[in-house]
Image (cartoon, rainbow, N blue to C red):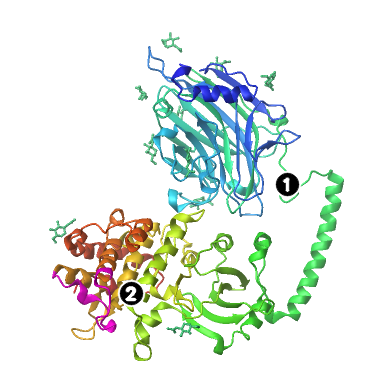
Amino acid sequence: MLLKFPSFLLLLHLLLLLKLVASSPTEELNFTINGFSGANLTLDGVATVSSHGLLILTNNIVEQKGHAFHPSHLCFCRNHSDGSIPSFSTTFAFAIVPEFTNLGGNGLAFVITPSTDFSEAQPAQFLGLFNRSSNGRATNHVVAIELDTVLNVEFQDINNNHVGIDINGMRSNESSAAGYYADDTGELRNLTLISGKAMQVWVDYDGVDSMLNITLSPINEIGTPTTKPTKPLMSFTVNISAVLLDLPVHVGFSSATGSMTSSHYVLGWSFAMGVGHVQALPLDYSKLPTIPRLNLKRHRSRALGLWLAVASLVFVLLVTFVAFAAARWWSKYAELREDWEVEFGPHRFSYRDLFRATNGFGERELLGVGGFGRVYRGTLPNSGAEVAVKRVSHESRQGMREFVAEIASIGRLRHRNVVQLLGYCRRKGELLLVYDFVPNGSLDKYLHYGRAHKPALGWSQRFRIVKGVAAGLLYLHEEWEQVVVHRDIKASNVLLDSEMNAKLGDFGLARLYDHGINPHTTHVVGTMGYLSPELVRSGRATTATDVFAFGVFILEVACGRRPVEELAVGPQGEQLMLVDWVIENWREGSILDTVDAGLGGEYAREEAEMVLKLGLMCSHPHPEARPSMRLVVQYLEGRAALPELSPDYLYFRNLSLGYNEGFDDFVISYPSSVPSASIFSGEK
Ligand SMILES: *[C@@H]1O[C@H](CO)[C@@H](O)[C@H](O)[C@H]1NC(C)=O
Ligand SMILES: *[C@@H]1O[C@H](CO)[C@@H](O)[C@H](O)[C@H]1NC(C)=O
Ligand SMILES: *[C@@H]1O[C@H](CO)[C@@H](O)[C@H](O)[C@H]1NC(C)=O
Ligand SMILES: *[C@@H]1O[C@H](CO)[C@@H](O)[C@H](O)[C@H]1NC(C)=O
Ligand SMILES: *[C@@H]1O[C@H](CO)[C@@H](O)[C@H](O)[C@H]1NC(C)=O
Ligand SMILES: *[C@@H]1O[C@H](CO)[C@@H](O)[C@H](O)[C@H]1NC(C)=O
Ligand SMILES: *[C@@H]1O[C@H](CO)[C@@H](O)[C@H](O)[C@H]1NC(C)=O
Ligand SMILES: *[C@@H]1O[C@H](CO)[C@@H](O)[C@H](O)[C@H]1NC(C)=O
Ligand SMILES: *[C@@H]1O[C@H](CO)[C@@H](O)[C@H](O)[C@H]1NC(C)=O
Ligand SMILES: *[C@@H]1O[C@H](CO)[C@@H](O)[C@H](O)[C@H]1NC(C)=O
């Protein structure tokens, strides 16, 4: 049996090093751990056991992993004579204490895994279990029950507070918002995982009917027993023997933090495995360790705690009074500042500094008015650095924390083709974003307005801009630590520095407007003409929807035309869909006729043809047909040849249908200020 395990020798070696005795995998094992003092667990990463028996999987340090496994080898092996699979039952008490109220990440998971070496796994959204390349592979043989506190669009998470069943990857096979069915009324009651309160999970697997049940419940108070709700939160049918392939496995926990952090604690754990119906022994609640209180880092005596509470109350009152007086004095510099922002201190600018930098947001410093607000030029009083300050009006506080957390992580993006975000400031009903100043302004001015005054951009400049934007987008999609979806690629969001290098700006801003009041409506945020059909339909921005917008953008650069243009001639209201027009010309063998006439015929024919065809390929109606940004960069750099395409490959006639289909959703969900419906019609 053991010799079937490929890395058995390696594992044995490791176990000997750890001075553990390798035993043959067992199909029966029962244990109950009420507080982890002295428990035999294999820990790694930042995981530790505190002196009073709390298993601390992660603390409040960013981008960390922590694991804890029971040393026993188990086997969910199929009985070859009667085909039965062992059952198991486990329950554990846990608590997730975010560093600041309502802002934490990423989660913890109960894991069944053949390997306990997670050194190559990534933290954050991968919960310390997988990395980008191993995620989703059947060769992982991992079953995890995740308690996930961050919404990852990438893995189609349902929200930022859910329980999920993850088989071999982070895209949950089944998930459910955190909650439980109350035994008295039968209603589903919500739970907030990052409330800092103790909760309990039961995972029950029946090897006969292959049913995996997950149940969650609050623990009302440490010390008082909690009864398991009768109706599980979720049930999922899975042949666990087919996933684990009879390999010897370990059971335990994995947890990770990302750019947002929480302390993930396990208080007690009980496990039972055997043939037929098994039930883990209940926890002894009187023996469970207590959870450290929010923001109270060290354990203190009660009396001292009381004094501290009184002292801090007095202090808070004093500070409030002083702050109030100061706020009146400086009413014109008033800002909005909340507790949870402490973490983002380094990214915070004072309104006073920004006010001075921009000469009181004077009209003379106004650089432009965009979809999201007015942009001013400024010079910071202390450093003398030139900045651009964007004032975004935003009444709702919904989503603001997540957004500020994102700003803080976006502030760490560094790429020559990405505009550097320096920080932010908040006022009542308003958010101010501070960027590096990019002197030559936005590209659309050069493409669409500048004709009368300036010569059109030359082809070589255009080609360099296209390559620069592609490089910036590749960085956001694939090269940074997290996948950043830009969501609003268009000529007016591409800025030019003094050497006419392109820099992508304004990413993520669309996100702020993405949090609908009603979770059932989707707010599609983006710009008309750059929205892919599936984005319009589902409201879900992905790297593929960015590639679509990039395709439209490079057609715009090559043709010097907007994605949707009103036709000067013909019946009123008739529009030219740039994509359809380029396809039409291609079909007729005159694709180069679409290149901007302003260039006076001076352009590299091969490059222009490649850019046009690549633009069409990227804006293909089917997301799977679009290339990744890595491939796009290879085409543009001439390191890969564009595949032979035919105009029919793109089926743009059918796309028109797609637009119309998608349009209904779009109208329903979009704020009422949106232009008329006809823009999406592909009819000529
Ligand atoms: C831990 O393991 C050691 C040696 O395997 C054993 O002596 C000890 O009793 C174990 N402790 C617990 C709490 O199981
Ligand atoms: C397999 O099943 C048979 C028949 O039910 C039983 O006698 C035998 O003990 C089982 N073997 C194991 C290893 O559980
Ligand atoms: C991902 O993890 C696997 C092991 O799970 C490892 O072999 C591989 O090198 C890792 N890949 C990266 C890119 O870290
Ligand atoms: C779980 O989902 C993955 C893809 O996310 C799929 O490959 C796998 O077959 C699913 N497993 C089960 C048992 O449904
Ligand atoms: C429970 O959570 C769900 C999903 O997050 C939400 O739709 C529902 O309104 C919540 N119910 C209550 C009573 O808060
Ligand atoms: C799972 O839940 C279903 C429905 O409540 C129940 O019939 C079944 O016995 C449960 N199975 C286990 C292993 O708890
Ligand atoms: C479970 O999977 C194993 C291995 O793939 C297979 O031999 C067995 O028949 C399956 N059992 C059930 C109940 O589907
Ligand atoms: C574990 O508990 C189950 C019942 O929950 C029992 O059937 C089994 O014999 C126990 N196994 C051991 C090794 O104690
Ligand atoms: C771009 O900026 C530089 C320096 O600010 C300036 O010299 C140059 O003329 C600008 N180019 C265009 C096309 O406006
Ligand atoms: C697209 O439409 C044309 C005719 O309008 C049809 O012949 C073709 O099969 C359609 N293609 C797809 C992929 O639906």
Q: Nearer the viewer, residue 370 or 114?
A: 114
Label 2 is placed on what type of residue? Answer: Val
Instruction: Identify the secondary structure beneath mark 1.
Output: loop
Query: How far from the left and from the top, in percent, is residue 10?
Result: 53, 25
The residue located at (84%, 56%) in the rendering is 310
Q: Can see residue 563?
A: no
**Residue stretch in magenta:** 588-607
Left or right of 639 in this view: 330: right
Q: Earlier in the sequence, mark 2 or mark 1?
A: 1
Q: Which residue is mark 1?
A: 293
Label 1 is placed on what type of residue? Answer: Arg
In the rendered image, which quarter is residue 623 located in? bottom left
**Residue 233 within the magenta-colored segment of the rendering:** no
* Mark 1 surroundings within 10 Å by alpha-carbon count, few (fewer than 14), some (14 through 19), many (20 or more): few
* Mark 2 surroundings within 10 Å by alpha-carbon count, few (fewer than 14), some (14 through 19), many (20 or more): many
Q: Which residue is mark 2?
A: 557
Query: How far from the left and from the top, in percent, is residue 322?
Result: 80, 72
Query: How far from the left and from the top, in percent, is residue 462?
Result: 35, 75
Query: How far from the left and from the top, in percent, is residue 260?
Result: 60, 53
Left or right of 394 in this view: 644: left
